[in-house]
Image: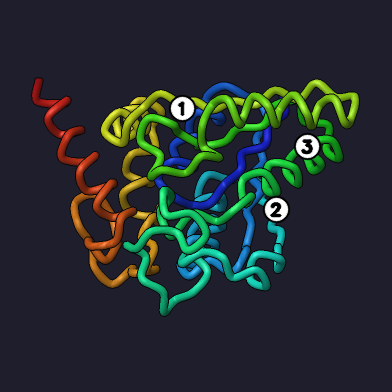
Amino acid sequence: MLAVVIFSGGQDSTTCLGWALNRFKDVKTITFGYGQRHEIEIAQAKKIADILGVESEFFEIDIFKKLQNSSLLESSSDINKPHPLNSSLPSSYVPNRNALMFTIAHAYAQKIGAKNLITGVCESDYSGYPDCQEDFVLSLENSLNLGSKENIKFHYPLMKLNKAETFKLALEEGVLELVIKESHTCYEGNRDRFFEWGFGCGKCPACLLRMRGWGEFKNLLDS
């Protein structure tokens, strides 16, 4: 019953960490630094893991900084524009990021003998990232297990949930206060402004998605 949570320190992965702690006997987290402009999330991931008493592992991936193919990697880029390589995608999309992270996390799971890998990807409210869709995750799970003669199960409890439902799940799993006070989603790395839904700039796509979800979540509670 050992599980590894791919942990960014954001709303989704913090909710998933709470979900995992309520279902698995032993849980560890793995966090990645890849040159993201909101690198404050790395510090928040470590802080959240420490608060919950979870062992955390950190890996630095410098290849994405060298590619420089996403506004999420350049602090001066406009996060609201279309992606420079594919106008149908948001500029914050980092090509193959999830594929590489899942591959490393799968290798780490093999090393420690974990048979469960948890990720916070979501296709119903996923900011337009194609590598957050269920078909992709299932395909990668199958390929990685085939290539390693393993049977590591990918869990993605948020896949069909929107942000309001994710807030509701955080409440049910006992981590809502932690999500609001400690998780970080804002692409600008802003932790100077605090809103009722958490810290952020209040203007970037990640903040707007979280803000809208919070409003819908409050409506769910009132209904």
User: In the rendered structure, are the residues bearing label 2 and label 1 in contact, judged by CB atoms less than 8 Å apart?
Assistant: no
SS for dot 3:
helix
Mark closer to the chain start, 2 or 1: 2
> Which residue is nearer to you in this view: 206 or 15?
206
Residue highlighted by disc 2: 57
Cα separation between marks 3 and 2? 11 Å
Tell me residue 50's x, y (percent). Answer: 56, 53
- Give the residue type that dot 3 points to: Ala
Q: Tell us which disc is closer to us: 3 or 1.
A: 1
Cα separation between marks 2 and 1? 24 Å
- Give the residue type that dot 2 points to: Glu
197 vs 157, left or right, is left
Residue highlighted by disc 1: 159
Tell me residue 103's x, y (percent). Answer: 75, 42
Tell me residue 112's x, y (percent). Answer: 83, 38
Q: Residue at x 37, y 30 (%)?
A: 124
Task: Mark yes or no: residue 17 visible.
Answer: no
- Give the residue type that dot 1 points to: Met
Report the residue that reaches farthest toward the bottom.
76
